[in-house]
Amino acid sequence: MGNCDEVGASSKQYGVTKPISKAGPTVADIQRTKELEKFLVDSGLYESEEEAAKRVEVLHRLGQVLKSWVKMLIRRRGYTDQMVEDANAVIFTFGSYRLGVHGPGADLDTLCIGPSYVNREEDFFFVLHDILANMEEITELQPIPDAHVPVMKFKFDGISIDLLYASISCLVVRDDLDIADVSILQNIDEPTVRSLNGCRVADQILKLVPNVQNFRTTLRCLKFWAKRRGVYSNVTGFLGGVNLALLVARVCQLYPNAIPSMLVSRFFRVYTQWRWPNPVMLCPIEENELGFSVWDPRKNPRDRTHHMPIITPAYPCMNSSYNVSTSTLRVMMEQFQYSNKICGVILVSCYVLEFFRSLLDFKL
Ligand SMILES: Nc1ncnc2c1ncn2[C@@H]1O[C@H](COP(=O)(O)OP(=O)(O)OP(=O)(O)O)[C@@H](O)[C@H]1O
Ligand SMILES: [Mg+2]
């Protein structure tokens, strides 16, 4: 069974170094990937069509609520009819939903972008809050204005939603607003930059991987693995969704023509050998004239204390895993090593499903 070398995504370089291997899959890899995909479906990692349709509908309805909220505000302030007509807000998604790796019941991470005259403190956390509080379909409404990234949490028709707000410095927000454009960060404060960051990061990740579908399947598998092995949690110093997404994306760059069954085992091989605190990054860290602080251990003493830097790929680049401590890093390294060993065994075995099960099995 020969490798299909030099195919597909191999002509372009992804990431900050050359790839480790441009090898494509063998027939056995293709078979293993099919079995892996079936395993993920059978394990219940994909939502039903009904749930997917409901999310789309909820997003649409929430978008309508946000648009009429902004129009109502500007009308109330006595602006002209033309300005009321132009008043607009747009809704973007980020997190696992935007990346296309969310499971059934996952939260829907959303960001509302509004014009300069609609602020977060009053308009979002009071006026919009009251509108939402009076809607029948909204339950468990919980505003958290003082969080590092201010957020309004609620359920809309039973779907959990995290809603962030960013007011950008323009009077009219167009429906086709490009959030990748760095000019969107002009004249805004740090919490707004952080609110925009999740969407900008998700879009960049999808642009920086050689093959989005292979990235998604591999990430679904590694999220499942991390949950079952007890290392899926950003707040407690392990790996959250965005950290894992970045780690998987980097492996996809290093093996641009590999398919998911190959990428899962390469993941464990790469991170078993990774010399932390060398940072994992998908693109160079750039400074620019806007002057926001970016991750830079030469400049910022605090960045030198990070044990497992996993850097976000959109300006201003930050370390997404600042919570990792020496002890959580040690636990994660043990888990990488344990799984890397199992992957070594599979190379000489054909019991693929057994292999995936043993990766997830909670024996230490
Ligand atoms: N430490 C962090 N650094 C940077 N961004 C973060 C961090 N934690 C969360 N975020 C942003 O918030 C988004 C949503 O976080 P969340 O915890 O919902 O994870 P998720 O990737 O959506 O996975 P899940 O399916 O578990 O919800 C992340 O994708 C990321 O954009
Ligand atoms: Mg989420």
Image (cartoon, rainbow, N blue to C red):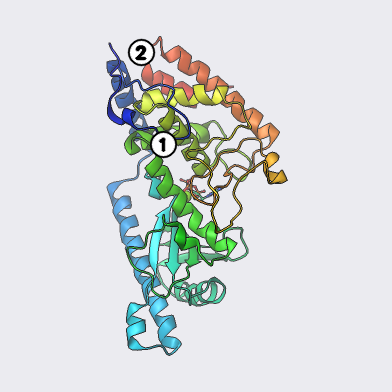
Q: Residue at x 52, y 37 (%)?
A: 281
Q: Residue at x 43, y 48 (%)?
A: 202
Q: Is residue 65 above or below residue 300?
A: below
Q: Position of residue 280 (x, y in %)?
A: 54, 35
Does label 1 or label 2 sit earlier along the sequence? 1
Q: Nearer the viewer, residue 143 or 304?
A: 304
Q: Which quadrant is home to the C terminus? A: top right
Q: Is residue 296 left or right of residue 106?
A: right
Q: Position of residue 311 (x, y in %)?
A: 55, 42
Q: Is residue 277 left or right of residue 74?
A: right
| Viewer can see residue 6 | yes
The answer to whether marks 1 and 2 mark residues whose Cβ atoms lie closer than 8 Å is no
Q: Nearer the viewer, residue 186 or 64?
A: 186
Q: Position of residue 75 (x, y in %)?
A: 40, 86
Classify mark 2: residues with Cα within 10 Å, few (<14), some (14-19) or many (20+): few
Q: Which residue is mark 1?
A: 220
Give the amino acid at mark 1. Answer: Arg
Q: Position of residue 325 (x, y in %)?
A: 68, 37
Q: Nearer the viewer, residue 279 or 106?
A: 279
For mark 2, give the secondary structure.
loop
Q: Is residue 52 above or below residue 139?
A: above
Q: Which mark is residue 12?
A: none
Q: Is mark 2 within 8 Å of ligand 1?
A: no
Q: Which quadrant is home to the N terminus? A: top left
Give the amino acid at mark 2. Answer: Cys
Q: Which residue is mark 2?
A: 350
Q: Nearer the viewer, residue 339 or 185?
A: 185
- CA gap, disc 1 and disc 2: 22 Å
Classify mark 1: residues with Cα within 10 Å, few (<14), some (14-19) or many (20+): many
For mark 1, give the secondary structure.
helix
Q: Residue at x 54, y 52 (%)?
A: 316
| Viewer can see residue 362 | no
